[in-house]
Amino acid sequence: MGVWLNIVGVIGNTLQFNFTGPKVTGSSTDTLTVNSASDGDGKVVSANMNVENLEVYDGAARKTTVTMATGGAGDLTLVLPNSDGDSGNALTTDGSGNLSWTDMDSVCAKMLMLNWDDGASQSLAAAAAGRYIDKISVKVTTAFDGTTPGIDIGISGTTDKYVDTTEIDLTTLGTYVIDVSNYESGSEEILATFTAGGGASAGVAEITLVQSFPSVTA
C-alpha cells in the first residue's frame, strides 16, 4: 500500500508521483528511468531508455520505430528545430547536432542533358542571389563527333565565367570536375553555351551544377 500513498492524483490518463526518479525495470540492463522535473519548468528533464528500438503506436495497428545506429563512438545528441518547416525543406545539421530546415535549393545539384543538336545556349540554373557556385562537372557519355565542339559555362555577357571551353574535351569520354567555389551576391542565370562544331551527328553530356545558399533556412 505504501506506493499508492505516494500518488498525488490522476489527470486524464496520467498518474502523478511525488517521489523522484520512478523506474520501470525488467533487469539491470532493461531499464526505463524518468528523471524529476528539477529544472523548474514543469517538464520532465529526461527519459533514459536502454533499448535497441523505440516503438510508438498510433493506438491501432500502425507503429513508428526509431532504431539506434550501431558502431557509433560516444553519445549522440540531436536538437530538433522549433518549427515544422516549409514544403520541400530538408532537415540539415550544423555538424554539432543542431538540426534546422533548409530549402532544397541550398543543397542541391542542377543537371542539364546536353546533346549534339541542342541550341547554342541553355539555362543550367535560374537566376538567384546569395549563392555559392561550388562545383561544375561535365560527364561525356557519348563522344561528340563534330569539328572542335566546345562548351562554356557562365552568365550572360561572361559565358566562360565558371568553365572555359578549353577545360573540357567533348570528343573524349570522361568526367571533368571543376572546383569553382565562387560566391555570387547578385542574381544571375547560369548558362551553358555550346558549340557543336561542323559535321556533328552524335554527342551526349551531363552537366551538373552544385550550388549552395548558406543563408537560407526556414
Image (cartoon, helix red, strand yellow):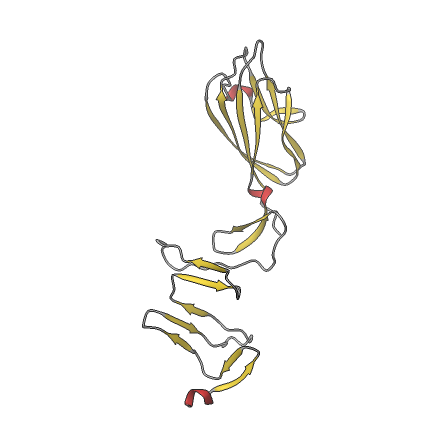
Q: Pick whichever, 28 or 55, lies toward us.
A: 55
Which quadrant would residue 150 be assigned to in this image?
top right
Residue 43 point in image, percent of width and height: 53, 73
Q: Is residue 2 left or right of residue 103?
A: left
Which residue is situated farthest in the front direction here?
61
Give the quarter of the figure containing the N terminus: bottom left
Q: Which residue lies at the image location 58% right of the left edge and 12% below the top edge?
A: 197
Q: Is residue 144 left or right of residue 117?
A: left
Q: Is residue 188 left or right of residue 180?
A: right
Residue 199 point in image, percent of width and height: 57, 9
Q: Which residue lies at the image location 53% right of the left edge and 59% below the top edge?
A: 80
Which residue is situated farthest in the left direction here?
28
Which residue is situated farthest in the top direction here?
199
The answer to whether 161 is drawn above or below residue 61 in the figure is: above
Residue 125 point in image, percent of width and height: 62, 33
Q: Which residue lies at the image location 32% right of the left edge and 73% below the top edge?
A: 27
Q: Pick whichever, 73 or 166, lies toward us.
A: 73
